[in-house]
Image (cartoon, rainbow, N blue to C red):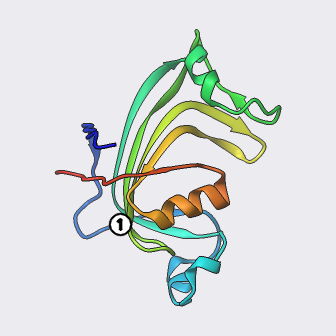
Amino acid sequence: NNETHAWSFPQLPVPLGSTTTITTGERSSDDLNNNQDHRSLSPPWSFQASRIHYQFRLVPIKVAAKYCPKEEEVFLFHFLGMTLGGIFCVEYTNTPIGPYREVAFLSGLVGRRSGIGAWASHIVVDSEDAAVYGERYWGLPAEVLPIDLEE
């Protein structure tokens, strides 16, 4: 498949010289990066990102329901037939599996016992390791494609 996709996102600026840290648990990515066999590591992880883009969109509940899990413990938040979705794009600079970029298409705002978050219906990453770990640890299949973030 030689299709090229291009998307434009408003940037949520991260000041020059700083990073944003996204943590999935208590271990730091520095600790994990010191382990030579990162393929055997499991979460929790800490990710540092240099750029984050988030574009919110209202998504019709009928569309969002097609992509959100049907499990009883997952609740799809909605109001007047709409939920909050959008596109999330991030450039991770320091992770246990190395730097990579990710674009997630968010179908809706969901809640479960562990908290509130956005459900990703489709994910694209530019690293094979990121795709493998996303599937293995979070059950999120991702397509591996080149991702170019422009200023």
**What percent of the width, then of the height, locates residue 76?**
67, 27
Q: Which secondary structure lies at badge 1? A: loop
Of residue 117 and residue 42, the one placed in the foreground of this image is: 42
**What percent of the width, then of the height, locates residue 91?**
35, 59
Residue 9 seen: no
Judge from the rendering whether residue 36 lies leftward or rightward of residue 49; answer left or right: right
Judge from the rendering whether residue 101 lies leftward or rightward of residue 31; answer left or right: left
**What percent of the width, then of the height, locates residue 55?**
36, 35
Q: Residue furthest left?
A: 151
Residue 32 is drawn in which quadrant?
bottom right
Q: Residue furthest top?
A: 80
* Rendered position, 41 above or below 35: above
Q: According to the image, label 1 marks what residue?
A: 19
The amino acid type, in three-letter code, at marker 1 is Thr
| Image quarter of the N terminus | top left
Judge from the rendering whether residue 89 lies leftward or rightward of residue 13; answer left or right: right
Q: Residue at x 30, y 53 (%)?
A: 147
Q: Residue at x 52, y 90 (%)?
A: 34
Q: Residue at x 74, y 39 (%)?
A: 112
* Rendered position, 146 above or below 5: below
**What percent of the width, then of the height, locates residue 38?**
56, 81
